[in-house]
Amino acid sequence: MTSHFKTTYGFERQDVTLSNWRAAPFSRWSFQHVSEIVPTSPIRCASETPETALAGAAMLDAVIDTGLAEARTARAFLDFAHTDAFVLMKRGEVVAEYYPPHSHENRPHIVFSVSKSLTAIVSGILEAQGVIDPEKLVSHYLPETKGSAYGDCRYRDVLDMRVSLDFDEAYLNKDGAYARYRRSTLWNPPEPDTRAESMAEFIYSLPKADRPHGGPFFYASPNSDLLGLVLERVTGKRFSTLMSDLLWAPLGAKNHALVSVDAQGSARAAGGICVTARDLARVGEMLRNGGTVDGRQIVPDGWLTDMLTAGDHDAWLAGEPNMMPKGRYRSQWYQSGEDDGAFCAIGIHGQWLYVDPTHETVIVKLSSQPNPLDDELKQDNLAFFRTVSRLAA
């Protein structure tokens, strides 16, 4: 007899392992059940309140210009783009929502590098409290980084991905530094006869590249995991507690979130946060409203203004980006540079939080895209977001 699990997902639960959980088709399940794969720590909301998805949004089936001949409606595009959850919010109200049969509106989904942007919000709150000074050296907060790439760089260089780092962000690497990185976070199986190292040990071992800090945009996920280590050190609190106290509970999130941790309990601030689509949309709406929720200032206005305006366009271009030619990068967030002022957080395998202030729109798209990067699909997603932002009632 075929199990209900296999009928839903096309494979059995026991087929999903630490070796394949980020690969299709298994990711359609594992991206929404991360706590069954790796250790996690809860990020608690103030009061968990299960939500009901909006049904019957007509715009999902209206013919629009998605830019793809094979996808003439929003629903067809979302299916094409491996979508697990989609929320379209206009002026704070959800106007369209989509979940395929294998997904659920109250199930936290891993958002990969959108985690970086959420981590930066917590950092910004602590900066406004005077706990962190972005101009200080990382080694001021973490003396053990002396001698590594991070020993003589500013915290600001880490925030803006301008650290001189000898590291290759090779997501499919199986035997180099990136594979070591994955093993240190417990995201990959251990190697026989190889000493296990913690995430912090791995990060502190990374060498500096042959260029000064503060140069071109150079995307490297260990930077953002380092941010999490700094936040824990300067506050004496676990990352999950900080995220709950400073962001998730004040935000009014309706579901608890979670973050993956390594063997020492250090959080994967760069990519291990799991949240529901609705709650992630609430983050975007808060930022669209100047960092406020119901009139309460959650994110400091000064930090938000800096994040939206102060990114170095020349550093962005020097990093040879494959998207947003007018863009900038500041404090772990992407600014489009377009007239609509759109900015976003992006994660591999198709995770998006997209905010269009001009059209008062917030979009969340969570996915199990087989290719971690897929630059062509990334451009398709951006074009789709611009289209539906303008169409939303």
Image (spheres, rainbow, N blue to C red):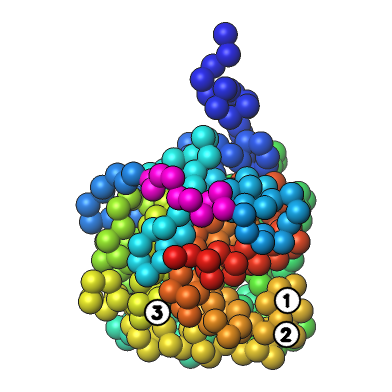
Question: Nearer the N terminus, badge 1 or badge 3?
Answer: 3
Count all numbered tags in the image, as a single digit. 3
Is the Cβ of the residue at disc 1 closer than 8 Å to that at disc 3? no
Amino acid type for the residue under numbered disc 1: Pro
Q: Residues within 10 Å of mark 1 (few under 14, many from 20)?
A: some
Q: Is residue 193 above or below residue 330?
A: above
Q: Report if residue 378 lies within the magenta region.
A: no
Q: Is residue 285 left or right of residue 179?
A: left
Query: Which residues make up the magenta segment?
Result: 53-62
What's the residue at 34%, 54% (across, down)? Answer: 43
Q: In this rendering, which labeled residue sits more in front, label 1 or label 3? A: 1
> Secondary structure under badge 1?
loop
In terms of depth relative to the viewer, which is nearer, 217 or 152?
Answer: 217
Which of the 4 image quadrants contains residue 301?
A: bottom left
- Labels 3 and 2: the sequence-earlier one: 3
| x and y percentages locating residue 12 in the rendered image | 59, 23
Q: Which residue is mark 2?
A: 317
Q: Are marks 1 and 2 in contact (CB under 8 Å)?
A: yes
Q: What residue lies at 49% left-to-right and 43% top-to-bottom? A: 99
Residue 143: x %, y % from top left: 49, 77
Q: Is residue 101 above or below residue 326?
A: above
Identify which residue is drawn at 66% across, 72% down.
Answer: 219
SS under mark 2: helix
Mark 1 vs mark 2, CA separation in Å: 6 Å
Q: Amino acid at mark 3?
A: Gly
- Marks 3/2 in contact by CB < 8 Å: the verdict is no
Q: Which residue is mark 3?
A: 124
At 53% across and 24% down in the image, what residue appears? Answer: 5
Front-most of residues 10 and 54:
54
